[in-house]
Image (spheres, rainbow, N blue to C red):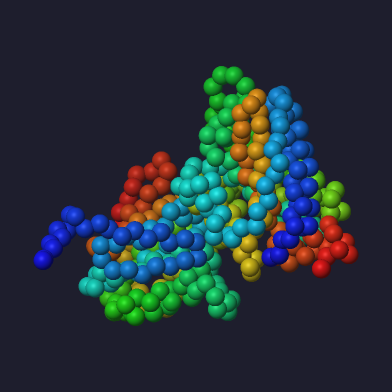
Amino acid sequence: MITLISVEQKEERKTIVKMGDWAVDQEDSQLVILGLGSCIGVALYDDFTKIGGLAHVMLPKSKGKKKAEAKYADTAVPFLLEKMIEKGAKRRRLKAKIVGGAGMFKTEGGQSVMQIGKKNIEAVKEVLKNQKIRIVGSDLAKDYGRSMYFHLTDGKVRVTAFNKENITI
Amino acid sequence: MNLDKEKKDILKEIANIGAGNAATAFSTMVDQKIDITVPRIELMPIEDLPEITGDQEDYISCTLINFEGEISGKILLVLEMQVVEKVLHLLFREGELPEDEIQNSALRELGNILSGAYLKAINIFSNLNLSQGLPAVAYDMAGAVLSSSVIDFNQSDDEIILLETEFIISDEKLELYYFFIPEEESIDIFFQHLMGDNLD
């Protein structure tokens, strides 16, 4: 017996990537981060194989820590690369989209109290540059939280926030 | 982090007194009787913090206050937005709420007073003289706010202490999450002060 499944009927897998965690998947799948503040969602995509990877980066530098690779910008990108290549992605085809790095907390005068978002942005950009991966889309900094939905069928990233228009990068 | 029954009991006692102080201060501000429930103590992985109110996309308010002295760390006061609205109506009594900046200012002040009340209980119990920094606030998705609040933190085992209390105002429960997050190197000093020679 042959079963035919049309594209419309196929249900997209959805993986929520928590703080400091990562996921790699291929086509018909969605990698999601809910509530990004000063953390950064680093999405890497190979548009030929439709393999995508998402890391939920919390801090700029691992300072030599071996555990929780996805937690730090400097270890998350090489780690995600390795996992994607293992699955069949080609390094030269990978492009990056990055979201987050906001400054969430403000004092009386409206000053942002923590600079960690900004430092995360710098660190992620630097490591992507070192790995020669081009950033083709981003929604960064400012002072509000975001959720990101990374669709592996076409590599598009939808970004939502409270009281803001949804954007697609 | 190791939080045995004895340590838990001590924290519970502190939380109880802290919440009692906070309720008294709160009660003076809104001119109503406020009761508290027995605090719940939990040690939780930092990764679970963004989901504390139930959903990472819940709209919440969070007041963040740094404390320092012999030990240092952070205090977080977390309220769901529906609760914040109720609190604002209590603070401003009848009529319409004032403009956003005045609301924010009132909430910062409330955060300041409530966390001060807890800190005072900690000071008395531990004989540590801790002072608090200026409060900072954020209103947004729980995930975004809570992950950002503790992220710059030096905690190798990545666990934090949650003290949860409910305030009851005229038979209505207002859920208030209170987090006491000492820096990692401060935790031992903290319990040494609390338990003296009984520390194993």
Q: Dividing the image into 4 quarters, which one contains the N terminus of chain A?
A: bottom left
Question: For this rendering, which residue is in front, B35 or B121?
Answer: B35
Q: Is residue B91 left or right of residue B200?
A: left
In the orientation shown, which residue stands out farthest toward the top?
A: B95
User: What residue lies at 57% left-to-right and 35% top-to-bottom?
Assistant: B84
Q: Position of residue B108 (x, y in %)?
A: 64, 39
Residue A131: which quarter of the image?
A: bottom left
Given the current orientation, which residue lies at the most extreme right position? B197
Name the spot of residue B97 as percent of width and height, x first: 55, 25
Query: Which residue does the image show at 83% across and 65% down from the upper left?
Result: B199
Q: Is residue B85 above or below residue A116?
A: above
Q: Residue, x 85% and y 48% (percent of image)?
A: B124
Q: Decide if residue B95 is on the left or right side of residue B25.
A: left
Name the residue rendered at 50%, 61% in the picture. A19
Residue A166 in picture, x, y percent from top left: 33, 47
**Furthest residue toward front:** A1
Q: How many marks?
A: 0
Classify the position of the C terminus of chain A by image quarter: bottom left
Residue A32: x and y in percent read 38, 58
**Is residue B101 visible in this depiction of the protein?**
no
Q: Quadrant of residue A162?
A: top left
Above or below — where is B162 with respect to A86? above
